[in-house]
Structure formats: C-alpha cells, structure tokens
Amino acid sequence: MLRRTAAPILAALLLSAGCSSAHTAPVPPAAGTSAAPTAPDHSGQSLWHVIDSNGNTVTQLGDDDPVVTAVRKTVVLHSGAVDNRDHRTIGESTTQEFTFYNKGFADQLRSQQYDTKLAALFTANHLTTRQVSIAWYRSTFPEDMTTAKVQMDSTIEFTEADPAYLSTNKFELNKPYTQHRTISLTKTGDTWTITAIEKNPLEAPAPPKPTS
C-alpha cells in the first residue's frame, strides 16, 4: 500500500524533505509546536503486530500496551525533533535528535558528517520547518519484543526558506508535505532507541479529484 525507497543512510536522513532523491531539505524544532498523533482508518484493527520468524501475526497489541506506549513515545519525540527545525537553532536541534539513536547509528551518521551537512543545509537556505501531523501504519515486534519496526507518516510545512531553494526543489511555503518512514528500534534495559530509519521523499497532497 505504501511505497518504500532504499537510500544510503545519510541521504535518507539529510534529504528527508526532498520530493525526489535530488531534493534537499531535512526536517528539527519550531519552539512549542507538537503534532497530535493521528491514524488512518484501519477498520478498528490494531496497528501493532507481534510476528513470528516468517512474518505472520501471532497476536496484536492495543495502543495502551506498555511496550507500544514506550515505542510510540520514542517515535513521537524523535519526529518532533527532526520535523520542527529552525536554521537559527539547528545545532541544538541536531543534538536533541541524536539522543534518540543508539551508539552504532549515531556513530555511523557522524562518520558521514550528517550533523555538519545538516547545519550547512539549513543555515545556507534559511530553512525552518514545522510538523503538522503524524499518522501510524502497521508496525511489528518479534516474539521476544526486544526490537520494533514502526511505519508512520509525518506531515510538515516549510515556514521559512530562501526563494531560490523553494524554486529549485519545487516546494512552497506553508504547504503540507507528507513523508512515510520506517523506523527500526531496539530495547536496551527499559529504553528504546532508534537503530535505522528509511524515509520516502516528501510528497505534496494529491490534487482533489474533479467532480462529475
């Protein structure tokens, strides 16, 4: 149902706001903003599945399950950090972002100079973004419940950007763009941390269908 793209880690994160692999605009915080979690209609079925080694659902978990609550909290806080960014505070924002990653993932990003390239992108183009909403999709745990793979959408808007940047990347200010993400997490003690992220390009909302 949802298209996925494979991309190197740095491109997948640094180009998180691109409408294609050539578009650049990662999305950390506009102070005091947070998006209310939302979910598409799935006919009342749980989105949280415990699966066996073959990927078959063994059981489903409700939103109020303690493990689900902990995982959702990590994903929500992380998305708030990476989707509410301001070129004036990009360094603080990136520091906050890295608190959600395990050491291996953080080291991998730093080795690719993700943090410095992110700062350069935001400051050079005077970018500011804010999160509008998030939505949840089918997400899974293995039976030992020590890892998780979360499918979600985040919708953002650009609230500031240089006109040349907007023109080059075919973006508009204050227009919603949605990105699908697959977030892998692992549990260490009582803490869930992010070990990998796959991101689709940002997509503008589909135009309304003509009425007959």
Image (cartoon, rainbow, N blue to C red):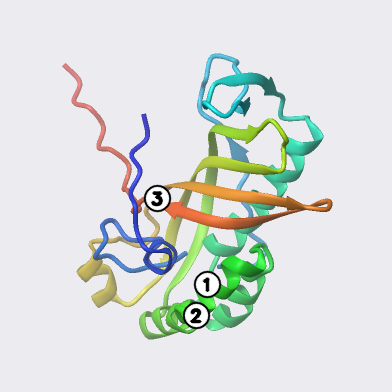
Residue 28: assigned label: none
Give the farthest residue toward the front.
53
- Asked if residue 101 is positioned above or below residue 206 in the image, the reply reads below
Closer to us: 113 or 104: 104
Q: How far, Cα to Cα, is label 1 from label 2?
A: 5 Å
Q: Residue at x 59, y 20 (%)?
A: 57
> Where is the C terminus found, in terms of image quarters?
top left
Residue position marked by numbered label 3 in the rendering: 176
Determine the secondary structure under disc 1: helix
> Where is the N terminus found, in terms of image quarters?
top left
Closer to us: 50 or 136: 50
Evaluate if marks 1 and 2 touch, with contact meaning CB atoms under 8 Å apart.
yes
Relative to 36, is 161 on the left or the right? left
Q: How far, Cα to Cα, is label 3 from label 1?
A: 30 Å
Q: Residue at x 43, y 84 (%)?
A: 123
**Mark 2 residue type:** Ser
